[in-house]
Amino acid sequence: MKLNWPLIVTLFISFIMLGVFLIGIENMDQVISGWEEEVAIVAFLKEGLSPDEVEGLYSKIMIQEGVEEIIYTSKEEALEKFLKEEALEKEMDILKENPFPASLLVKTEKRIKVIKEISERIAGYPEIEEVDYGGRGVEELFRATSRFRMIGLILGVILGLGLLIVASLLFRLTLLRERIGRLKEKGKSIWMIRGSFLGQGILEGLSTSLVALGILYGIYRLSILRVEAISFMNLEMALGLVGAGLVFGLLGSLFSWRRIK
């Protein structure tokens, strides 16, 4: 079987481009997820609550849909965290008593609607003095991250469709007429010839995507020796890249069938 080198080289470059895009999206998504992970509701408790009242409040909040974790910080723990800042320790000597309230750090699903609804419910409890989740700044953050993910998805689809069009055109332009002629001379039917080219297209697309994935991973392994913070694409993206090779080979071959006569 004679390899279609112009097609293979073009597919290889295409899969490298698509892989670099996916790696970039994965790393940006991790940064965004880190920002979103920092978002939580802080509920400051009123003074003088008994342990039973705090426990009851904890239970009321924990059973709410969307709540994932609650961390209690006592007045003493809040003061201790504050005093870890040496520059602030001297200022605390002026105060005669601990000014910090006990609080609950409520971690929820990372959706702004859920965060706002839970914040409003918690603020209505009699044991709560004040609730804060970041307000407008957090809302802007979630809007921005949502837009980024949507743009990333759209760009990925556009890039994928563009590469698919390029692959299908190359399949059509690089059909080996002499090979088709030899197969006809051997008595092969049109459907057998088409099947042969279809199988070759799938094999070339799949193998090229696997090679591109391997090279990208090799480059990644070399890169983390200098920049440890970067990540490779996740498993779903890697499988998607290999699947793209299969799809490109399949559809590219199918789009070229009319030229095989």
Image (cartoon, rainbow, N blue to C red):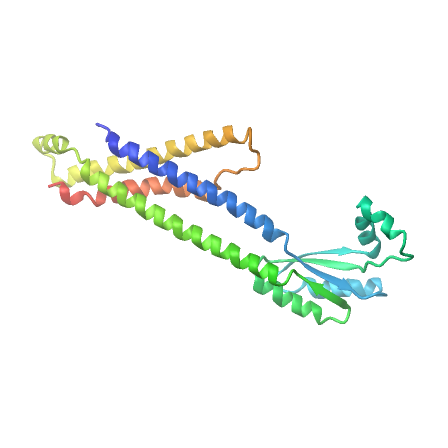
Residue 165 visible: yes
Q: How many numbered callouts?
A: 0
Quadrant of the image containing the C terminus: top left
Residue 114 found in image quarter: bottom right
Q: Residue at x 50, y 28 (%)?
A: 222
The percent coordinates of residue 50 (x first, y second) are: 85, 64
The percent coordinates of residue 251 (x first, y second) are: 26, 45
**Image: 51 above or below 157:** below
**Image: 9 above or below 77:** above
Quadrant of the image containing the N terminus: top left
| Left or right: 126, with 37 as reference point | right
| Left or right: 190, with 127 as reference point | left
Q: Nearer the viewer, residue 82 or 176?
A: 82
Residue 235 visible: no
Q: Residue at x 75, y 65 (%)?
A: 57
**Image: 260 above or below 76:** above
Q: Residue at x 82, y 64 (%)?
A: 52
Residue 185 found in image quarter: top left
Residue 22 found in image quarter: top left
The percent coordinates of residue 165 (x first, y second) are: 27, 45
Q: Residue at x 61, y 59 (%)?
A: 137
Q: Nearer the viewer, residue 205 or 63?
A: 205
| Left or right: 87, with 162 as reference point | right
The percent coordinates of residue 149 (x first, y second) are: 47, 53
